[in-house]
């Protein structure tokens, strides 16, 4: 039925299911979830992976279906935003601020983004993102969005995952965009941020005592940072960006 509806209305089933209420998505996911549980049998490692997958499904972070071969497929819908300023540099997430440890840990650079929630359209997810960490920049979103679909094995869950990514573009002329880096409100006084030009998100958005740190980079810098193995290292390079 979904494939027929998708063909008739030119709406792909992945985004259609993503926009459904959580209880409906959960009902659609249950047969595949039972199949994963049956495959786990009495294997402790696979049962642990199943519990993690089950939790994610119930929280609305993904849903389960099957591919053309009858195998279980985990589907994750995401949005990303390429936010450019006047000089062509764009905003990327380059680290995570830890309130508990009072440090920033480097991560591989990535565009600001978010998983779409159950019952949410891509534009609604974008509004949630820009209204949270990026609100001070007043992003002006351009027309249209590009959709990418890729599949990869999820070893931690023991299934294949399809990532449906909706990529938006936007520009900003906000005064805050002149500075180098964004950090959570109240974090400016910590030693790790000394001698770094900062702009403040003016928001209380800590998630499990962590928040994103952003910087403005060129395409070349982004390619380098996105492919560098920086995970877990302490943040040392912001001043040079």
Image (cartoon, grey):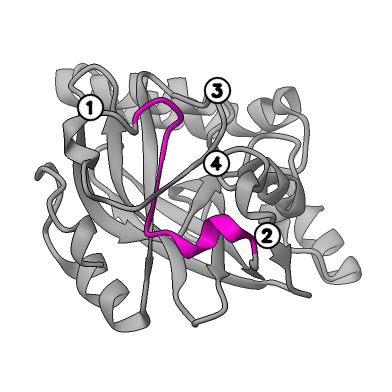
Earlier in the chain: of badge 2 and badge 1, it is 1
Q: Which residue is mark 1?
A: 46
Give the side of residue 35 with respect to residue 102, left or right: right
Query: Camera-side residue: 127 or 202?
Result: 202
**First in sequence: mark 4 or mark 1?**
1
Mark 4 lies on a secondary structure that is loop
Based on the picture, tell me whether residue 183 belongs to the magenta stretch.
Answer: yes
Mark toward the start of the polypeptide (3 vs 4) = 3
Label 2 close to label 1 by CB (< 8 Å): no
Q: Which quarter of the picture shows residue 98?
A: top left
Tell me the CA gap for discs 1 and 3. Answer: 20 Å
For marks 2 and 4 on the same chain, the one whose residue lies earlier in the sequence? 4
Camera-near label (3 vs 2) is: 2
Point out residue 183 in the picture as x, y percentages from the top left corner. Answer: 39, 40
Percent position (x, y) of residue 69?
Answer: 47, 59
Q: Which residue is mark 4?
A: 133
> Which quadrant is the C terminus positioned in?
bottom left
* Viewer-side residue, 79 vs 100: 100
Disc sitting over residue 18 in the figure: none
């Amino acid at each position: 039925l979904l494939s027929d509806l998708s063909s008739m209305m030119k709406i792909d089933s992945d985004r259609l299911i993503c926009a459904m209420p959580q209880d409906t998505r959960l009902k659609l996911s249950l047969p595949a979830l039972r199949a994963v549980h049956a495959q786990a049998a009495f294997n402790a490692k696979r049962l642990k992976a199943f519990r993690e997958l089950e939790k994610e499904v119930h929280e609305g972070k993904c849903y389960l279906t099957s591919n053309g071969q009858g195998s279980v497929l985990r589907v994750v819908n995401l949005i990303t935003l390429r936010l450019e300023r006047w000089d062509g540099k764009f905003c990327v997430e380059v680290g995570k601020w830890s309130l508990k440890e009072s440090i920033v840990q480097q991560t591989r650079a990535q565009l600001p983004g978010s998983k779409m929630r159950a019952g949410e359209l891509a534009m609604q997810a974008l509004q949630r993102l820009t209204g949270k960490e990026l609100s001070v920049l007043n992003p002006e979103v351009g027309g249209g969005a590009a959709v990418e679909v890729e599949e990869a094995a999820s070893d931690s869950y023991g299934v294949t995952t399809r990532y449906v990514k909706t990529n938006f573009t936007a520009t900003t002329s906000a005064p805050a965009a002149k500075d180098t880096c964004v950090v959570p409100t109240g974090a400016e006084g910590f030693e790790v941020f000394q001698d770094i030009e900062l702009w403040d998100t003016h928001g209380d958005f800590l998630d499990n005592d962590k928040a994103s740190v952003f910087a403005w980079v060129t395409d070349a810098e982004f390619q380098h940072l996105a492919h560098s193995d920086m995970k877990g290292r302490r943040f040392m390079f912001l001043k040079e960006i």
